[in-house]
Image (spheres, helix red, strand yellow):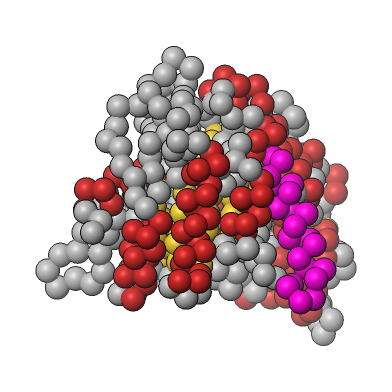
Amino acid sequence: MLDADTLSILTESAKYDVSCSSSGSKRANGKGGLGNASVGGICHSFTPDGRCISLLKILMSNECVYDCAYCPNRLSSNVKRASITPDEICNLTINFYKRNYIEGLFLSSAVSGSPNRTMELLTETAIKLRKQYNFNGYIHIKGIPHADEALALKAARYADRMSYNIELPSERSLKLLAPQKTKDSLVSPMKRLRAAILCDRENAARRGALLPAGQTTQMIIGASPESDGQILRLTEYLYRHMGLKRVYYSSYIPVVRSPLLPSVPAGLLREHRLYQADWLIRFYGFDVNELCGEGENLDTDLDPKCAWALKNMHLFPVEINSAPPEMLLRVPGIGAKGAYKITEARRFCRLDFDNLSKMHIVLKRAKHFITCKGKFYGAEGNAARAALLIAGRSDSGECNQQLSLFSDRENAVSALTGEL
C-alpha cells in the first residue's frame, strides 16, 4: 500500500509544473467546514466549456539523472527521493476517482534510470488505466526528452493531452542551465505528435482518438535573460506551426541555489502581461511585432492592448456604429463578446455610450478610442495614458499593488471573459 510520506514527496515534487491551474495549497478543513485543499496532489484545470475539474497531479519518480540547475529534483539536489509503480498510480487514481476527489490524472516523472525506461512506465500506466481498469477520465502525460518518439506516439493513443516542457526560451539557455536537454529533444517529438494528430483527424474511422485535448508546453520566465519579445515569438511559432493548445508561463522562483540563476524571483506581473499578450495573439488576431519588439519587454504599467493602442493613436478614435469587427476587437475594453454584441445591436439602432455600458463594455478604457454617433468623451495623447494608468489602479489608489481580478464590476467582467 502507498504510504502517506511517499505520496507527499511525489505530489510536492509535481507542483512546479503550471500546466494545471493550481496546486500545492495547504488550506486544511476545520470543524463544521466543507472540503479539504490539503489533500496531496489535488489540482485544478478547466475544460473547453469552462468547467473546473480536479486532477491528481503526481510524479512517478523524483529520482532524476538530469541535473537542470533550476529544478528542485535535479541529480545534485539534496531532497527526499521516492518512486511508485504503474499499479500503485492506477490504484490511487481509481480510489480517488471513486471518492469523487478527482476527475482525471496529471502524470509526470523525473528521468529515472533512462529516458526510454521512464517513458515506458508512463505509457504502461496509461494503458493499464484504460484497458485494465476501464478508466475513461482525463489523462495528461508529460513527455520525456530524449525518449524514443515511438513511445510518445504509443502514449498518445491513451492520453487526452501530452506536453513537452520547453522550460527555457532559447537553446543557449538550455545549454547553460539544462545541458542534458536540447531543443531538438523537446521540439522534435512535438512535431511528430502534431503530424500524427493531423493524420488522425483525416482518418474518419479514428478521428479524435489521438490526443483529443492536444499538446501544451511550459516556459520558465526570468530564470534566463530572454526578453518578452523573444518569448512571444517562440509562443507564436508554437501556436501557428505546432498547433499547441496552450503555452504556460511560470515566473521563476529561486527554490534552488545556483550561481547560474538569479537570486530574486521574477515576480507575477511579468507573467501576467505575457498571458495577456498570449491571449491577444490567440484570439484577437494580433501579431507579435505589433505587441513587442524582439529585444523588448512588455509595458508593466499597461496591459498589452492599451499599450498598443497608445502607440497607434492615428488609428483612433473609431466610430462604434460603423467600425468593422476586426477593428472593434483592437479597442481596449472591447473583447470578442463585446464586439459581437455591438455588431449585432447596431443592425437595429445607432448605439450610444449608455448602450455600451449596458453591454458591459469597459468604458473607462474604451472611451479614449471610440466615438458614438460622432461624440467623443475620452482623452488624447499623454492625457489618455494617464487616464488609463489611473483606471488600472486598485480602489485604494496604490500604483504598485498586485493586479486584482475583481476590484470592481468592470474588472470582474474582464477577468471572467478575458476581454482586454
Seen at 27% across and 35% down, the residue is: 80
**In the figure, residue 145 lies in which quadrant?**
top right
Q: x, y percentage for residue 136?
A: 50, 74
Above or below 13: residue 364: below
Q: Is residue 188 magenta?
A: yes
Residue 274 appears in the rendering: no
Q: In the rendered view of the protein, which quadrant contains the N terminus?
A: bottom left
Q: How many marks?
A: 0
- The magenta segment is 187-207
Q: What quarter of the picture does the C terminus occupy?
A: bottom right
Residue drawn at x 52%, y 49% as measured from the top left: 120
Left or right: 116 in relation to 198: left
Q: Position of residue 299 (x, y in %)?
A: 63, 36
- At 60% from the left and 45% from the top, the residue drawn is 164
Does the magenta portion include 191?
A: yes
Name the foreground residue: 305 vs 390. Answer: 305
Q: Nearer the viewer, residue 327 or 28?
A: 28
Residue 273's place in the image compared with 23, above or below, is above
Q: Quadrant of residue 27?
A: bottom left
Where is residue 307? Give x, y as percent.
Answer: 69, 42
SS assignment for the magenta stretch, majority:
helix
Q: Is residue 383 left or right of residue 407?
A: right
Question: Would residue 77 be visible to someone looking at this image?
Answer: yes
The residue shown at (47%, 65%) is 128
